[in-house]
Image: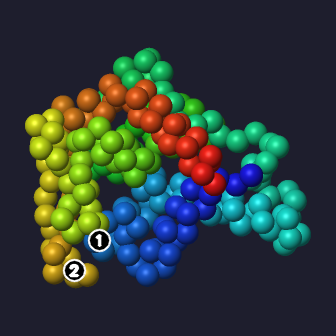
Amino acid sequence: MLDINKLRNAYKVINQLSQNKNPFAEEELTLEIVQSAEVQEALKDAAEVIAVYGKIMNLVSQSTNFSVAGKSQKKDFSVTPEEIAQLKTTEMPLSISFVVKNINESIPAIVNEQMRKLTAPGLGRWLMSMGYLQMADNGKNKVASEKGVALGIVTEQRESQYSSEGYYVNYYPQTVQQFIFDNLPAVAEFLAKEKEENNAKA
């Protein structure tokens, strides 16, 4: 059975990209955004949905290389203590996309396409659930809460051609990167529980 959340996320990303918009923030679409882990993962999900329904309708070759019901799929995101120890922070503050990119490129199971990637929206939801991020007044962007500011998250406001209110970008300094690394098991547990709850509602 298809994951309804994968379908919704894939639709959102493709719809925004088709309008030359960043799917995750109100800013201009750039090559960096298109190549980000979360966009690439959503596009893979969209291709999988097309392949599954295409096979059902006999529109796609049965040899199309996608996992469907009854066949093996990628494992959900997880991380071992040994893998966490190998993660390296950077002195330069990073956006959440680059923090996630750093993580994904350092975990062998993800590199070998045996495990699903961690995504920036997923990590953002965990940070929000823990009280480190909150919704901005514009109702569109996440910004650092008082607790997040105390942790070290830096929120900057940018001008936008789409809105007079502009938009917000969060940066994660070295100490916050390490905090995220140390809490990746909790992030994985949060995402697994979130997926279970969403599947139960579907």
As drawn, is 95 to the left or to the right of 114? Answer: left
80 shown above or below 13: above
User: Where is residue 56 shown, x and y percent of the image?
Assistant: 85, 65
- Dividing the picture into quadrants, the one containing residue 24 is bottom left
Residue at figure coordinates x 47%, y 60% from the top left: 39
User: Where is residue 111 shown, x and y percent of the image?
Assistant: 54, 38
Q: Which residue is mark 2?
A: 163
- The amino acid pointed to by label 1 is Glu
Q: Is residue 152 visible?
A: no
- The amino acid pointed to by label 2 is Ser
Residue at figure coordinates x 15%, y 39% from the top left: 147
Image quadrant occupied by the C terminus: bottom right
Q: Please, what secondary structure does the residue beneath circle 2 have?
A: loop
Q: Residues within 10 Å of mark 2 (few under 14, many from 20)?
A: few
Q: Residue furthest top?
A: 82
Q: Please, what secondary structure does the residue beneath circle 1 have?
A: loop
Cβ atoms at labels 2 and 1 below 8 Å apart: yes
Q: Residues within 10 Å of mark 1 (few under 14, many from 20)?
A: many
As drawn, is 53 to the left or to the right of 38? Answer: right
Residue 26: numbered disc? 1
C-alpha separation, residue under disc 2 versus residue under disc 1: 8 Å
Residue at figure coordinates x 84%, y 64% from the top left: 55
User: Where is residue 43 shown, x and y percent of the image?
Assistant: 57, 62
As drawn, is 2 to the left or to the right of 70? Answer: left
Q: Is residue 121 visible?
A: yes
Upstream in sequence: badge 2 or badge 1: 1
